[in-house]
Image (spheres, rainbow, N blue to C red):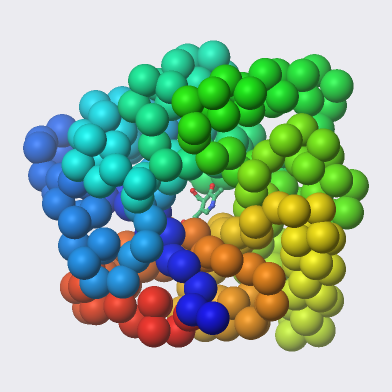
Amino acid sequence: MTLKLGVNIDHIATLRQARQVPYPDPVDAAAVCLSTGADYIVVHLRKDQRHIQEKDVALLCKNFPGKIHLECSCALQMEKAALKYKPFSVCIVPEEPGEVTTTGGLKFTPETAKRLAQMIEHLHKKHILVSLFVSPTAQDIRFAAKLGADIVELCTRDYSEAKSAKQAQKLVQDLALATLLANELGLEVHAGHGLDYHNVLAVADIGGMTCMNIGFSIITRSIFAGLPTAVSEMKGLL
Ligand code: PXP
């Protein structure tokens, strides 16, 4: 079965924001990605809007219905934006001020669990699928299922930063076991963070995964190879 590919285009907006001009336009980038192998477009609306702006989310959802996967925190302001623009799906991620990128899966404390359950319920009422970004542990997968998520996105950061082949192999095993459990609990499974043209195969080979969400490696490859080639090469690997 061919895995789906979600292309994260945050860094197209990072380039645009560097000059505060209208280009490169994430809407143009989304059109190119979708016509060259992407199944979904992923954007992270951060509180500081340092790359993707709320108006980008509005335009992307309007132009590509059923194709936009929005990443955001569980802050009320983000829930409001998601309910307004109605992406196909929302992945709730932890967000720390000043972080360079998302640092890991959600931490399920009683307070966050309450808030997540509430946000999931509100998104479901608008028929938006909900994914939770989690560490590949049995405890967190069970928690996500209990909260009513549709999807878990397994964090591949540790795997992508593995210091040895042996460590990477052990982390792939953890991802495989997490996928098995998530599937048993009725959850769809995605994976993302730090995946590139070399390390994606071991994760893509795990049975039961349905989608890889990949940004940085594709956008940086596009500088040299062009966006259509960068996307189609990645899709080819899946
Ligand atoms: N999935 C999630 C939940 C993320 O936060 C990110 C980074 O924004 C990605 C996937 C994509 O990670 P990368 O840019 O390293 O491919």
Q: Would residue 118 be visible to someone looking at this image?
A: yes
State the image coordinates of residue 161 (x, y, percent, origin top left). Answer: 66, 67
Which residue is depicted at the point 48% across and 41% down?
89
Position above or below: 99 against 30: above
In this rendering, position of residue 50 left or right of residue 171: left
Q: Would residue 216 be visible to someone looking at this image?
A: no
Which residue in the rendered view is the most extreme toward the right? 139
Which residue is depicted at the point 68% across and 39% down?
149
* Mark count: 0
Res 200 quadrant in image: bottom right
Which residue is depicted at the point 40% across and 49% down?
42
Position above or below: 163 against 76: below
Which one is nearer the viewer's eye here, 95 or 131? 131
State the image coordinates of residue 148 (x, y, percent, origin top left). Answer: 72, 35
Res 225 quadrant in image: bottom left
In this rendering, position of residue 153 left or right of residue 51: right
Quadrant containing the N terminus is bottom right
State the image coordinates of residue 222 (x, y, percent, origin top left). Answer: 26, 70
In this rendering, position of residue 158 left or right of residue 35: right
Position above or below: 219 against 106: below
In this rendering, position of residue 238 left or right of residue 193: left
State the image coordinates of residue 128 (x, y, percent, origin top left). Answer: 49, 35
Which residue is depicted at the point 15% across and 38% down?
19
